[in-house]
Amino acid sequence: MCGILAVFGCVDCSQAKRARIIELSRRLRHRGPDWSGLHSEQDCYLAHQRLAIVDPASGDQPLYNEDKTIIVTVNGEIYNHKALREQLKSHSFNTGSDCEVIAHLYEEYGEDFVHMLDGMFSFVLLDTRDKSYIAARDAIGITPLYIGWGLDGSVWFASEMKALSDDCEQFMTFLPGHIYSSKTGGLRRWYNPTWYSERIPSTPYDPLVLRHAFEKAVIKRLMTDVPFGVLLSGGLDSSLVAAVASRHLIDSEAYCQWGSQLHTFCIGLKGSPDLVAAREVADYLGTRHHEFYFTVQEGIDALEEVIYHIETYDVTTIRASTPMFLMSRKIKSLGVKMVLSGEGSDEIFGGYLYFHKAPNKEELHEETCRKIKALHLYDCLRANKSTSAWGLEARVPFLDKEFINVAMSIDPKWKMIKRDIGRIEKWVLRNAFDDDEKPYLPKHILYRQKEQFSDGVGYSWIDGLKDHANKEVTDSMLTNANFVYPENTPATKEAYYYRKIFEKFFPKNAARLTVPGGPSVACSTAKAVEWDASWSKNLDPSGRAALGVHTAAY
């Protein structure tokens, strides 16, 4: 991942302003420690902090078209850049960067090209010919982006809130699947898939179609010029990513540079469920497995730094981000710069344990749609920012546009959990990879109960966080929480503790409003809490809060 910062329409164009932009861009250097770039054009600035993954030698940014009238700063990966280059044969490319196609596509098609990009991205582009500019974010919001407005009328864009929060009067999360155009002065949605309307699909379930779509999604993400691996928790999603990557590595371009043995990584408290399961999967697949440990105290000590980097006070996101943050530091120390990860599957297939209580296929499908639309506020935010904190890039094949279209077109009756006939959560995905002739995974791993990452690293992790918060937050503090924090009032001492840390780094009201709120059980939306009356008395985002479902429920 890289870090981008762009500012348009500054009243002050002095050397001091340039220095200020450089200073703010430097706050994103953790995202891109390999090189820094800045293009200034009168009252416009486009800054970039680069993490070099594709074409490390010549792909420094900002990037330009042939005559340098179009400038673009990009955070992301464009997996179909070679195919797009074939469509742009009349253009001359300056680098081997996958992101350079954006400048040339704009030159060829104007603003209506974003749907052609297959990848994860946030970018800002300046057209110096008429001083117009656009900004866009990928379909699901895998990469982060914020938009802000200064008192001088300037418009700001940044990968992380910390680069613009001090200098903007107002700011907000830039919506996924949207484009901003200075010509119209507003956001419009460029991503309009069929599932977005939440209409109930009726396509029959075909396990091979689903399997092939996922394999294709993993293979395209093996595009890299640097060492890489897979985050392997031992759960279904990460294990499938590892299994497919391991099976197809020998046929990829990465094989020529990095060999055929896949590296896998796992973290947990000693004796945790994830460590045991991940080791078994790694042994089965024959990967070079790296096992990292952390203690509850080490996690607690890292909380302030974690919240600063992930920019949220959401409880479940912080619980899961902390071990991922610690693991990413260990992975980067080994010289690895890119990892594949399993985020998105639970939202697409109804994998969270609360989906056991979905009353019918219609409500299940609508809930999966709501969950996918909110991913940029939760798991995408966690996976991106907790890895980017250490200059590590996370790629998420389950959130491939084509794969989502296939998975979300399946009649949701196949996603309904029916324990009486052996259909547990995510049965359609498990069944698609249940191959007796050439097994991808051992059966008991393929059908392992869902564990949320914050639970799987060790149940005492969450218990330890709650104990720590109980010592730091008094009963009186929680009683008066609605006066201190009238928006998204914390309902527990743990939530209060995180909110207090967040407010120290991001005190503005605009920052508070970037974080979602509302009741949740086992990661549900507020709407799904209505599925079981007992859940309203046990509102906790842990999977173990799914009473009557999780084998270790509390």
Image (spheres, helix red, strand yellow):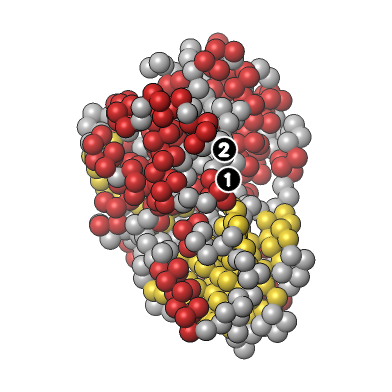
The x and y percentages for residue 453 are 40, 35
The x and y percentages for residue 317 are 45, 39
Cβ atoms under marks 1 and 2 closer than 8 Å: yes
The x and y percentages for residue 504 are 41, 48
Which amino acid, mark 2?
Answer: Glu
The x and y percentages for residue 369 are 66, 36
Q: Out of 283 and 175, give the one closest to the viewer.
A: 175
Q: Quadrant of the N terminus?
A: bottom left
User: In the displayed structure, would residue 228 be above or below residue 547?
Assistant: below
The residue wearing badge 1 is: 513
Please indicate whether residue 272 sits to the left or right of residue 106 in the image. left
Which amino acid, mark 1?
Answer: Leu
Q: Quadrant of residue 212?
A: top right
The residue wearing badge 2 is: 487
Q: Secondary structure at mark 1?
A: loop
* Residue under the point 40% across and 68% down: 26
